[in-house]
Image (cartoon, grey):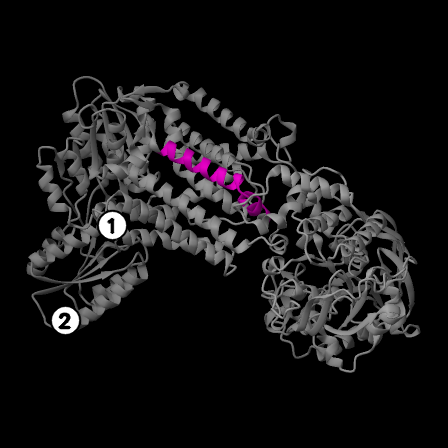
Amino acid sequence: MKTLMLGAAMAALSTGVSAQTIGFSQIGSESGWRAAETTVTRQEAEARGIDLRFSDAQQRQENQIAAIRSFVAQGVDAILLAPVVATGWDSVLEEAKEAEIPVVLLDRQVDSSEDLYLTAVGSDLVHEGAVAGQWLVDNKPEGACRVVELQGTTGSSPAIDRANGFRQAIEGTPDIEIVRSQTGDFTRSGGKEVMESFLQAEGGGDNICALYAHNDDMALGAIQAIKEAGIDPGDDILIVSIDAVPDIFKAMAEGDANATVELTPNMAGPAFDALAAYMADGTEPEKFIQTESALYTQDDDPMAQYEARKDLGY
Amino acid sequence: MLLTIRDLTKTFPGTVALDGVRFDLAAGEVHALLGENGAGKSTLIKCLTGMHARDGGQIALDGQPISPGSTQEAQALGIGTVYQEVNLLPNLTVAENLTFGRQPVRFGMVSRRRMHEEAREMLAGYGLDHVDVARELGAYPVAVQQIVAIARAVALSGKVLILDEPTASLDARETETLFEVVRGLRARGLGIIFISHFLDQVFDLTDRVTVLRNGRHIVTAGTAALNRVELIHHMLGHELEMAEARRGVQRDGPAMLRAEGLGRRGRIAPFDLTVRRGEVIGLAGLLGSGRTETGDVLFGRTPADRGALREPDGTAVELRSPRAAIAAGFGYAPEDRKTDGIVADLSVRENIALALQARRGWARPLPRAEARRLAEDYIRRLDIRPADPEKAVGLLSGGNQQKVVLARWLAMNPRFLILDEPTRGIDVGAHAEILRLVGDLTDAGMSILLISSELDELIAASDRVIVVRDRRHVSELVGEDICTDRIVQAIARPDADPEGARA
Amino acid sequence: MSQGLRRLAPQLVTLAAVVALVSAFFPGFLAVEIADGRLVGSAVDVLKRGAPVALLAVGMTLVIATRGIDLSVGAVMAICGAASAWAVSNGLGLGAALALGLGAGLLCGLWNGVLVALFGIQPIVATLILMVAGRGVAQMITEGRILTFSHEGLAFFGAGDVVGVPTPILIWIVTGVAVGLLVRRTALGLLIEAIGINRPASALAGVNARVLLIAVYVASGLCAAIAGIVVAADIRGADANNAGLWLELDAILAVVIGGTSLLGGRFSVAASILGALVIQTIDTGILLAGFPSEFNLVIKAGLVVIILVLQSPRLGPGLPGFGLRAPRAAGVARTEKATE
């Protein structure tokens, strides 16, 4: 709330008209990734000489709606919105449309009609899983490969989609078999505890060829469990996970993890590009801009990646 | 007769609550039911309203025998009850309270309009025309809530109305309003049972009086035919003829404690009191007169806000908490031993050792063997049964529980012991034993404040008797003056100040 | 001693039954081997993973014995883990890290105790405040991220071992034995039970209920602090969002399985720890059995219901080993009270 008022006050103060003014209504800072998204968005705006007006909604939709109204009243050139929930945006999006201010959704979708926003930038969760699966298909050792899977919170859409994408990718490779699958609730301690039971259940870990974790945190917990069991993660058991948080690069640099699929915090870059094209000559972008789900392995200079990311707020 | 009760008997483990009680109620009469705590009033009412199942006897309503199994059933038969604490829901509207459980329903929904109509009809004739039935009940004063409760009970039941201490939280004007309502209901032919410990109100309102004592019927008489003194006689009793008073055995003992203007606003008016070594001070008075409040102030349970208690050398005794009082060498066996005395799930041994342990502090546990020896010693001396130190005290009878509480304090060897109703609800044998014990203790030099509603007990045990009335110490009796007549007169003397009766 | 065993019999029987059940699904459950000089096996995992709930249950037992409840322990774990992690990641050294973590737990317990004992706020409400606010405090310490550290000294408390035995196991055993001895070798246990059963009567007998109440909440806070340090040390990081999440409920459940009444009074620390092990055996058993994760909570709930029903006083006496809890004498007292 304080941030919101502060943001509004600062916005009101900066009367100087720069090249472009864009408002950004962020959900909050509930996770490291979210904090990184905020940092990267600021960096991208600065690099383009954009005057970014930032508003932190502290997980509340009413704060976001208030922030968008205030952006409209200030007459910004465009609005970035990372919506906290999917529903209830119609009227405020219409207000923006009437004021002819384009809105770009970041990271999450809304249920409103497509003509109420310019485009949405986001990652494809199924694709992320598929990239992870494809890496394993390409890098598995000779012969049969028994895989254990650490799932996200049961029933959450990342858990469902990342599981499906992975399965699609390994479908044509009969050597790869998912032998155990259990939720680690996206947490390090969950990942560690469940991995311990996997190791017990699978002959002390001798029967496991690879671990697929739905996020890096669970993988990091599992790596500790594997080490404590006297096995070498990254070597005896291959580790592939999703998110690309800084700590996983550290693990890669130490040879403990093998690959991660990036859920990029840079949603703003593509959004700014689409806006620039739209404002320059009215180019209508696609309604969904999929960010790249880049794959990082031990060959990608993980220590440099770690250094580049460690101050983004993860 | 509208209601006839004969030979009503009810026993609980360790106590006979009602012993062959009879009671009659005519239509169009207000009948007072009187007695001290534990006399059996509540049990009688609960048998009547279906909250207790009686062990024996008959109840007849309009000549038909009845045995209500629940309050709903009693209501359906025509018996309604209004308690001291209004048992309505203050956050619902007046109308909702009045029609609760039988709201008029239309198309499966409560019809608010009809509910309000019904509520207004129910309140007609109670002088509550200014009350808006759509407002929350809690917005109105207690007296109005009380009358709403009566209106509901009358509408639900309509034959017998039981008013259990209805005036306890009302002021004089509100009480009069309530009485007008009650008189109106009497004129309409209801039979009303009125329970109150305000004798003025009994004389003011009721037609007949029935007195219970120790679960037995003592007397039923027309109110007009009784005077205050007789009534108190009946309530406080005159049963044990053993009343050979100790009279002044220790009257010349040295002063041990001196209360100077000790009191607490709203509970007990400032009083002076000298406690001599080895004497028994009796405290006589009716329920709510300031008996227990005196004990509470002397033990720091409700710390005094004025005056001081001093040692003979003039130093003040700290009385801000029971712990402080215990440190000063005091002990206190409270009136309600179930809620304030015993710790039910703990064993006899642990209960006896509790105060001693609390004084030693947690770091210095009383060795188990020593605690056991202590418990066995008191089990023998006080004849506590069953003689098992490991038995949970909640499983013992009332008299034995009381002995355990006494043992807890005797183990502390206090110099000043306050006993509030030490013999209530316990059998005759235990009664005599406890009185004998009081004598033995004072012979050994302990001073005792004995609070009791049994005059015979006071007369038998006390060296002096202080009489309390209207939360004030009003007189002190010594020597030959310690007799039933003098005590009753002191209790009964009508008060000049009508507000005082409300204190 | 035989009396103590009799008190623990229902919990021991329950634990044996749950172990037997898990062994049926996963035959190697009880097998323990030594690998790299340390004990390895599912049973060892149960003892190790059960540490947080066992530790919380120790403090929770004391609180519940006073007729209270402490809902804040999960959040307190997060705070204390974060405080310790913050200390080592800022180079303060192990001593300071432990002192900060335990000190935070002590302060949290003191806060709860003061609200309950001095301000007379109902325990469930008083501790709810910290339950909700505590995670926010922890997030402020970690600045919203998982605060990782590589301090081997602190990690030892979660992932280390002493002559082959994982440290968390030793920590809960030492804590449990220490608290058990403290309450039973001194008069604390008796006094706590007394105020739990009848606070007015105990106060009149001179028991200092206020100080005792504050003390049990402080004890609970300290136990939560130890649990928080163990959990943070285990993953070498303080996860403010997830550390100890919902563990207060497991701790309460452990106390209930341990046969201590939520109405206060008689308690057994050892029985509560056995209750915690029962819960952990179920949790680990579910993971080992390899059911889809959608079934985890249903299976756990089902087993807990069966255990509680079998231990209930009403059903218990018909079954050997169960229902040995004495009927509450308070019930009798309540009936008699009606005599007035």
Circle nearer the N terminus (1, 2)? 2
Foreground: A168 or B474?
Answer: B474
Q: Residue at x 68, y 39 (%)?
A: B373
Q: Estimate the x, y position of residue A213 in percent, counting from the top left.
A: 25, 34
Q: Which residue is mark 1?
A: A108
Q: Chain of mark 1?
A: A
Q: In which image quadrant can residue A57 be found?
A: bottom left
Give the magenta part as a residue range. C168-194
Q: Residue at x 14, y 36 (%)?
A: A295
Image quadrant in which the N terminus of chain A is located = bottom left
Identify residue type, mark 1. Arg
Foreground: A11 or B388?
Answer: B388
Above/below status of B259 relative to B346: below
Q: Estimate the x, y position of residue C76 in percent, counting from the top left.
A: 38, 48
Q: Chain of mark 2?
A: A
The answer for how far apart the CA atoms under marks 1 and 2 are is 30 Å
Identify residue type, mark 2. Ser
Is disc 2 placed on a helix, strand or loop? loop
Q: Which residue is mark 2?
A: A14
**Is B382 situated left or right of B362 in this image?**
right
Q: Nearer the viewer, mark 1 or mark 2?
A: 2
> Any magenta on residue C178?
yes
